[in-house]
Amino acid sequence: MQIIDMNTTDLRALNTALQAGEAGSAWSVHNPAGRHALAVGLMEDMTVTIDGHAGYYAAGMNQKAQVTINGNAGQGVAENMMSGAVHVKGNASSSAGATAQGGLLVIEGDAGARCGISMKGVDIVVRGSVGHMSAFMGQSGNLVVCGDAGEALGDSLYETRIFVRGTVKGLGADCEEQPMTEQDRTILAGLLERAGVTDCTPADFRRYGSARTLYHFHVDNASAY
Amino acid sequence: MTDHNHDFTKTEPRFSATFDPFTISQIQRAAATGIYDIRGGGTKRKLPHFDDLLFLGASVSRYPLEGYRERCGTDVVLGTRFAKKPIHLKTPVTIAGMSFGALSAQAKEALGRGASAVGTSTTTGDGGMTPEERGHSSTLVYQYLPSRYGMNPDDLRRADAIEVVIGQGAKPGGGGMLLGQKISARVAKMRDLPEGIDQRSACRHPDWTGPDDLEIKIEELREITNWEKPIYVKVGASRPYYDISLAVKAGADVVVLDGMQGGTAATQEVFIEHVGLPILAAIRPAVQALQDLGLHRKVQLIVSGGIRTGADVAKALALGADAVAIGTAALIALGDQNPELAAEYAKLGSVPGAYDDWQDGRDPAGITTQDPALAARLDPIMGGRRIANYLSVLTMEAQTIARACGKSHVHNLEPEDLVALTLEAAAMTRLPLAGTDWYPGKAGF
Ligand SMILES: Cc1cc2nc3c(=O)[nH]c(=O)nc-3n(C[C@H](O)[C@H](O)[C@H](O)COP(=O)(O)O)c2cc1C
């Protein structure tokens, strides 16, 4: 385990070291003190523990690495993640997992607004609740919310699947509740297991998806008749 | 002889200036379809533009350079503020961001080939980076847009510069659009969208909102790319003084300012024609913002929107820009609006010179299409030559003017070399009205 203390290391040195880190290596970042852009652009299958709170864009654009944040995370945690996993032990601010294309993002606490905005293939599991406009324009991947969802859930949704256990304050444009299929249940069960969620089962959740009415501009063609 | 057939008891049919034939056709179209008109290109109405400025040239009080012999530099370095690897271009004319998706792969390749041949840069667009484009562009700027289609750290590191797009001149405040006809299997896969849908992308970035957040976003991008790449911030011209100030405060190395004449692949007509500022009105406040921050020429300014000739290039530089970008003119150089395609344009209800259904995917020139048969009409090698030729002409024209003004580098052109032909242009640029030493707003009228 290699330890980097942010009281004595600057951000550039931290990220340079981590980006050069070898597969299988293990790192611990002490005194992160809410610093932004911690552990961004990692490229190898290694483990990184951020021991405290992280600012914006922690683990941004992650590839392969397993990053754990032992605290809260600021805006855009794991934004545009490609693969690997990011685990937030506390709460996450807005735009968690924004545009992420792969990997697994687990948030033990609550997530703020726009969780999973424009997500493109990532799997996100939130143990608590998510704020408004979550999964806005979600393109693919899965958002699992064990608590409640705020207003305008799944607004302008594409093909992301959304699973919510608690209440949904309101659905966004073109988002609708859909029947849970066998395939959905399998996906959900797998995600709960990967996220280490043992206190709820797929049967507790409802499934939301795109009604696909916004996929095409509506043209009336009144003159054609 | 009198014309006994003419009925003098009636006046001629008279068209309304308010409800002119085009406006009437717009109303009829709206009533027939129930959807706003979407098209490509930029503003078509007449706007104050570079044509409203003139160079004075040298004479007794100024000393010209010998036209063909004396050196007149055209190179430009972009990204000198923070980036470890600024980019060096041989000409200040760059190719603006246009997506693979909006344009065919052949068109993107041709742009890359042409730009590389003359030592300038080309730019990706709202759809990610293609290997063809990277392979054929010696200097490639990678756009970072609200949609983040195809965005990934490998391409970010493969790029020579990163352009954070906040807006574009054709639609400041609007997001991207690509209609279903152009969402081919390849385009859909790159963007992670269902094939054939009408894609409407977001107008705001998903993970930051104001300028303070932008500063943090830029820091993240630099951290991911080892502080090597110049970071551009592109804005549509709307409140240039404040927008440029804030982009610079957020840490931009280069700012890109796109006026309302700037082209688009697909946007609502109402947006194209009614939102934003003409580039002529936007350059002076942008330069002022840089000067007030003490960063003019340290943070480079690229302007675009209706650049057509070397005179436009020279005027933009004289007003204080470091470089320009071209979109529409590059497409024309590739073969858009070709008169030989008149019969095919007619089938699409248009004529050479007015074709603007770039959103539609049926471009007979093979440029704004994803149809394999149409796209195959554009030979990327020949297209690249045409682009290189055109870029060379723009550069030589700008040099011609600079030498005539006595400048040994195009960047030595200055406002003092220019006058305004109209009151509007004088007011917008603070250049004196031709023949006077006065511009509106200056005391002493
Ligand atoms: C076909 C086409 C596609 C475009 N796509 C993008 C884009 O993806 N991202 C962007 O920032 N600007 C885009 N633009 C705008 C150009 O980058 C540029 O701002 C504009 O074309 C400059 O004005 P001009 O066309 O008058 O030269 C596009 C323009 C055209 C014509």
Image: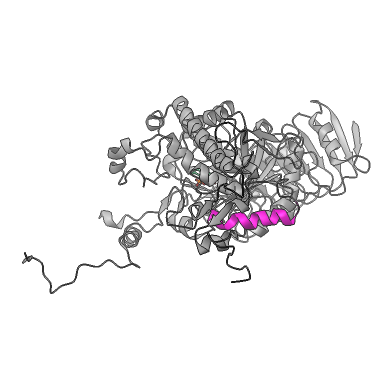
Q: Which image quadrant for residue B276?
A: bottom right
Colour scheme:
one colour
> Which segment did they paint magenta?
B278-294
Q: Is residue B287 magenta?
A: yes
**Residue in the picture at 56% in, 45% down:** B314
Residue situated in front as seen by the camera: B423 or B117: B423
Residue A154: where, in percent of width, then height?
58, 52
For the question of whether residue B183 can be seen, the reply is no
- Residue A162 pos. (x, y %): 60, 48
Q: Is residue B80 visible?
A: yes
- For the point 71% across and 44% down, the residue is B253
Q: Which secondary structure type mostly characterizes the magenta part of the structure?
A: helix
State the count of labels.
0
Please, is residue B382 above or below residue B404 in the view?
A: above
Side of B9 relative to B263 (left or right): left
> Residue B98: x, y in percent?
53, 40
Q: Quadrant of the C terminus of chain B?
A: bottom right
Q: Nearer the viewer, residue B115 or B210?
A: B115
Q: Is residue B345 above or below residue B281?
A: above
Q: Nearer the viewer, residue B29 or A151?
A: B29
Looking at the rendered image, the quarter that the N terminus of chain B falls into is bottom left
Q: Is residue B400 above or below residue B35?
A: above
Q: Is residue B131 magenta?
A: no
> Residue B259: percent from the left, percent from the top?
54, 53
Task: Please give left or right for residue B136 compared with residue B212 in the image.
Answer: left
The one of A118 and A131 positioned closer to us in this rendering: A118
Q: Quadrant of residue A82?
A: top right
Query: Does A173 appear above or below B230?
Result: below
Q: Farthest residue toward the front?
A: B60
Q: Quadrant of residue B10?
A: bottom left
Question: Relative to residue A190, is residue B267 drawn left or right?
Answer: left
